[in-house]
Structure formats: C-alpha cells, structure tokens
Amino acid sequence: MRIVEIREFSAGTGEKRSNAIMDFSGMTTGFVAVVTDVIRNGKPVVGYGFSGTGRYSQNAICRERLIPRLLAADPESLLNDAGDNLDPFKAWDCMMRNEKPGGHGDRAIAVATLDMAIWDAAAKIADEPLCHFLATRYGNGTVPERIPVYVGGGYYGKTHAELQDEIRRYLDDGFTTIKMKIAGAPLAEDRKRIEAVLEVLPAGQLAVDANGNYSLEQALECGKALQEYGLRWFEEPGYPLDYHLQAEIAETYDGSLATGECLLSTWDAKNLLRYGGLRPDRDLLQFDCALSYGICEYIRTIAVMEEFGWSRSSLYPHGGHLLSLHITAGLGLGGTENYPYTHQPMGGFTDGLKVENGLVGLPETPGLGFEGKANFIRLMQENL
Amino acid sequence: MRIVEIREFSAGTGEKRSNAIMDFSGMTTGFVAVVTDVIRNGKPVVGYGFSGTGRYSQNAICRERLIPRLLAADPESLLNDAGDNLDPFKAWDCMMRNEKPGGHGDRAIAVATLDMAIWDAAAKIADEPLCHFLATRYGNGTVPERIPVYVGGGYYGKTHAELQDEIRRYLDDGFTTIKMKIAGAPLAEDRKRIEAVLEVLPAGQLAVDANGNYSLEQALECGKALQEYGLRWFEEPGYPLDYHLQAEIAETYDGSLATGECLLSTWDAKNLLRYGGLRPDRDLLQFDCALSYGICEYIRTIAVMEEFGWSRSSLYPHGGHLLSLHITAGLGLGGTENYPYTHQPMGGFTDGLKVENGLVGLPETPGLGFEGKANFIRLMQENL
C-alpha cells in the first residue's frame, strides 16, 4: 500500500470578526487530501487535513517542501511494521528531513495540516474513528461516551445586548462553559462587557481570553480586577513567549490561568512548563494540535507534560474542531473548545452531534468524521 | 515617493554539502526587489533582499501575505516624517499587521527578506552605504574602517588532508579565526578532525559548531573533551530552544560558548538571555538578522541585550553575507561570519573586498552594495 497522490488548495474564510489583536477578514485556510491505494467500499481511502483555525494557510510550505519529500520516499518507509497501514510517525520524520532546528512557526502548521490527513487516512484504513485508533495505541485503551466542551465566542463588535444574545444562544445549544474576548478595549469597558455577560451566565462558567495583549502591568491590573468575579479561567494574559510575565501572574492570581495556543512545538511547551510558573492543580494548557506539528508532536508534548508532573486532564486543546475533539477523547485530555459558528467550515464537529450540559458525544465514522460534516466535505468535493 | 512594485523569485542553491543535521542539496533561497519611484543616475532605486543562508525560500509568505499588505498601504504611511524616504519600521509594522503573536519561524525569514530590500532601498535613497545609514541613526555615529570576520567552513565529507587544505586556503585568504563543524560524527572521530585542523591552525583561532545536535550528556562530554584544546568558542552544543542545557554547559565549560542563529525573534533571544545562563564576559550571541525579522527586529534585540547587561561587542551575527557585515559595522557589533565560497551567490561580501589579518573593509556603494557583487547582481538581472 502507498500514498498515491496528495492534493491541496487554500480558501479565504472571509469572516468579519476581530479580537484584541487580529482582524480575521483576510484569513485563509489550507486543505489537503492524502489519497491512498487502499480501497474501502469500492473507493480509495482519502485522508483530509486543514491548517487549523486563526492562522493562515501554509500550503505553500506543503507544496514546496513537505509533499515532495513524502512522494519521493520509498512507500514502504512510511508504513507500520505489519506493512498494512501508514505509520504517521514515519511520515512525520520524512516531512521534517533537512529542516533546521528551531523556528517553530508556519512550518509547524504545514506539517500539522498533512499530519492530520495522514492520521485520518490511517484511522480510516484501520476502519476506526480516530479517537478509538488513538486510545488503543496512545491512550488508556478506552474512549469516554461524552467529552467536556466549551465554546469560544464573545468577540468584539457587538453591543452588550447582542453579546448577551450570543451567550443565551450558546446556553440554548447546550454549552455550559463559555469564553469571551477581553483586552481589545480599556479595562473599564471590558469590565462592563464581562458584567453584561454575567447577567446571563454564572461566573464559574465564564472564561475570558486576553489573546496575549497585556503588558505585565496591565495583566496584573486585570488579574486583580478579575479576581473578584471568580471566573472559570483567565486566558493568555501576556505575550505567549513571555514566561516571566506568566509566572508573575501565577504568583498573584488565585484563579485558573490558561495558555498555550500560540506555542507551536513541544520545545516551546516545555519552556512554558519549565519557566511559566503554571500550577498543575488549577491551570489549563491549550496547545493547538492543528497548529503545532500535529498529533505526532502532541503525543510528545503530552509526554513532556507528564514528566513535569501534569495530568492529561489539564490539557484543553485549542481549535474548536474535529481534530481537537478526537485527541481529547482518544488521549484522555480534560476537554476541548468548540467553534460551532465561527471559523467555518473547519470549526465545530460533525452535523447532528448535540451538546448537552456542556458535554458532547463522538462521531462514529472512521477517521476524523469529516464525511459527516456537510459544509466541510462539500468544500473538499468542490476543490480536491 | 512610493514603492511602485515588488518582484520576487526563488532559486535552488544545489550545493553538495552537509553538517551534523542537514543535507543542503535541496536548499532554496528567496530573492526580492523593491522598486521605488525615486530616480538616481537616471534609473529607479531598487532595493534587493534575500532569505538568508541555511533555511529555505519563504517567498510564498511574501507573495501571499506581506507584499499585498505593503502594496495596499497608503504610500505615505510607509514614509519617514520628512516624507523623503521609506521608514523601514513603518513598513515592518505594515507587514506584520494581522499576524498572530508567537510562532516565529518561516514568517520571520519572509519579513527579513523584504526588510533587507527596504533598508537597501532606504540607504540608496539617502545615498549612503547601509552601515553609515545605520550608524548615524541607530549606532554611535561612526563606522570603523575594518571589521573582524571569521570564516564558517569545515563541513563533513572531506578527508583530514582535504580539511587541512581548506583551512590553509582560508589562512591564505587572510582569515585568522576559522569555524569547523562537529557533532555529525562520534566524538572520537571529531577529536581526530579537530586535531588534524590544529596541525595547521592555533587552537585560539579555531571555533567548533555542533549545530545543536548534542543531548545534554553528549554536550557535557564534548565540552569536557574540548576544554583541553583551548578553542576560540564552542557553538550551539544543544537544541537551540533548550535553555536549560545551555545553562548546564555554561556551568561547566570555562571557554567561550556561542549560540543564537536558530532563535528567530527578539522574544526567543530574550528567553535565551533570561534562562540560558550565558556569560556576558566571554560568550558570543549569533542571532541571524536575515532569518529573524530583519534589521528592525535586530535593533529591538540589541536593546534587550543591553537591558540584560550585554555589550554590542558580544554580538557576532550569523549568515556570512553583506547584511551581517553592514549591521556589524553600523551598529557597533563585535564581528561577523563570512562565507566566501559556500551559500553562493548570497555568501561573502562585495568583490575585491580583501580580508587581511582577520579584518575586512566595507563596501562604499550606497545600500548593501549588491551592485558590487557580480554573481549576486547577475542573478538579480536574469530573474527580476
């Protein structure tokens, strides 16, 4: 068996939305299809991947460096020992051949895009949903029936009444934990936005996300102001690589902190754990698998977390899509984000998968289950 | 005045050469030309840039994200206060608009490629060599007549006799400090290579570069073995983001250490200084301007270094090309690398610039002086 062809395209998401630091209207996403010569139900098995949410398509790096390496490799060198399926770790090593160490940015996204498609194909070849495929090989062997999910929303550009309506809609949808954006406005204005939301949501269910926009002084001031609310968590107070700031906040803010979505490699994650002062008894880590070299690297990141005394249940992958859902279920993580309405068609899970009491079920189709997400698979069929 | 057009192309370097971790035969370099409407000697001023040495062309990121932002900007918003030249810092901010924080990899190279061309154009518009343009604005106002340079070579794939011949050739060329690769072979074999080189070069003039290939144990073992030679410096013992390893080596190795070429942003540099245990009285920092967001970011990195008690003379920019030469002269840095024969046509300085006693003069043409480097300017004229 072998990879026969790798197709790819990029698309603009064109969403009118912004947070403290980004306008998303020019955002693009990369999509890839890894076509194998394995036949299931009369058709070749195809694995799909995309470049995560919130950063740009990196398909040019796939085209120029990674896909040529995969297609030039001896097909046998990418298979598992039994020779009956792709070995994603071997494909990962192949993609990273002749790449210099350090510099974990856009390349991490490009590798993750293809890694997702390779795991999708491998799970489909094994005829298992990805979460089961992962659980039996890299988890504890079992998959829970339902997974904790929170919803990311509360962007700027809405009145308080519109913000409250958005929150009510999430509650109606079955979410219990809801995250809103802060730090894109002066603290006094953000307090009013938070207080408007707290009129319709208990504080223990509201998380706030500063998207790394605060200086140390601002972050400390905001932490002091947030303390009284008793929120679920305070996310990315400062610049993602500012481990010193993170450690200072952890000294003074009693509640839960969360960070990690902008650290795109195991090495960056390790430095956060080593120097960031985070507390395994209350803080959340949110490394984004689709932006940080994919599942192979995520499994290495989990090993580093465990080495530093963290439980897998502290890990809440960022991204709000099917990849995060499957790794959460298959690798025994704490819970994950969901973007049911934003970042489409990547955001959200398979159609009809209902959220109830903040928990969601799992897709039962082989692979990631893209075939059960109509807007995603339609885009693939139109373009690949 | 305004940027009229930005042209770009990529080329393979096709060099048969390898170090501890990389085979360079598939390496590519990106080139850009920023065309302005300013006329000098009857022709429009054009600034050139390239994507450094040792990592791949990132022109796709230039094409997809950075160039469209520069060309869409109000031309006045990219000018200095007098309105008579480009302001590279304003262009830098424009390129980084709507880029998420963290993830400093390929994007850092793409920004640096265009940043180089914008500074080249700005210095040409001011009718000054870049080193003078920098010295009067961001240095101490003066430029030394000659600059310390060392030569990077000693790659694998040569017999000891060939390695010695290579070293003799560098000495004949006027270099005094020479760097060779280690860590691509077992330590016993590297010791023999080092000892072969020491037959033709005093130990205080030989630096060794492990390209980040050692584990902590290997790095400590190698440091112990190197100690007796009294080499000029021991470069990149471990993974570039492993600040802990770096600090451990600094505890036990008395000689000079050097690192930094794989840290692609001011934030990564700051974390190295904060956590890497390096010693301002003897160690060298080698941040590569052409790979780490260019001159604007380099000036910010220098400010962070000074904040942490380092002198500019500890900074030896990696890269071995005209950009490193000009920033070393203009910003008062300690010295720089030179690649007279490898990484062509980017490596090395302008034609006819002679190295004597380990020192080199400076180009006197406006900008970086690409017009005085025949193999570089020929490639530009053929492709842009």
Image (cartoon, coloured by chain):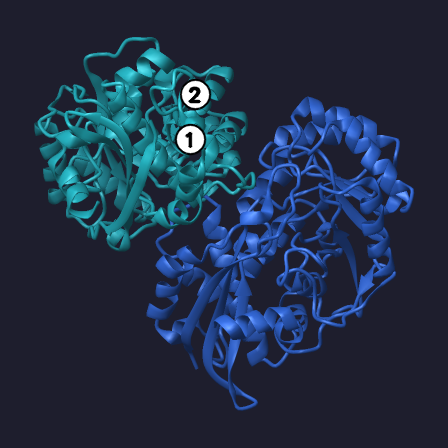
Chain colours: A blue, B cyan
Mark 2 belongs to which subunit? B
Mark 1 belongs to which subunit? B
Eyeballing the image, is B262 above or below A33? above
Q: Percent position (x, y) of residue B308?
A: 51, 18
- Determine if residue B116 is in view: no
Q: Percent position (x, y) of residue A198?
A: 89, 41
The picture quadrant where one finds residue B359 is: top left
Q: Amino acid at mark 1?
A: Ala
Where's the N terminus of chain A, which quadrant? bottom left
Which residue carries the number 1 mark?
A: B91
Which secondary structure lies at badge 2? helix
Q: Amino acid at mark 2?
A: Ile
Eyeballing the image, is B182 above or below A127? above
Residue drawn at point x = 32 percent, y = 17 percent: B134
The picture quadrant where one finds residue B371 is: top left
Q: CA distance from mark 1 to mark 2?
A: 20 Å
Viewer-proximal residue among B97 and B56:
B97
Which residue carries the number 2 mark?
A: B302
- Choose mark 1 or mark 2, whichever is in front: 1
Q: Residues within 10 Å of mark 1 (few under 14, many from 20)?
A: many
- Determine if residue B325 is in view: yes
Which secondary structure lies at badge 1? helix
Q: Do dots 1 and 2 share one subunit?
A: yes
On screen, residue A290 versus residue B57, left or right, reads right
Q: Percent position (x, y) of residue B277?
A: 50, 26
Viewer-proximal residue among B72 and B34:
B72
Q: Residues within 10 Å of mark 2 (few under 14, many from 20)?
A: many
On screen, residue B2 versus residue A46, left or right, reads left
Residue drawn at point x = 71 percent, y = 73 percent: A363
On screen, residue A72 versus residue B129, left or right, reads right
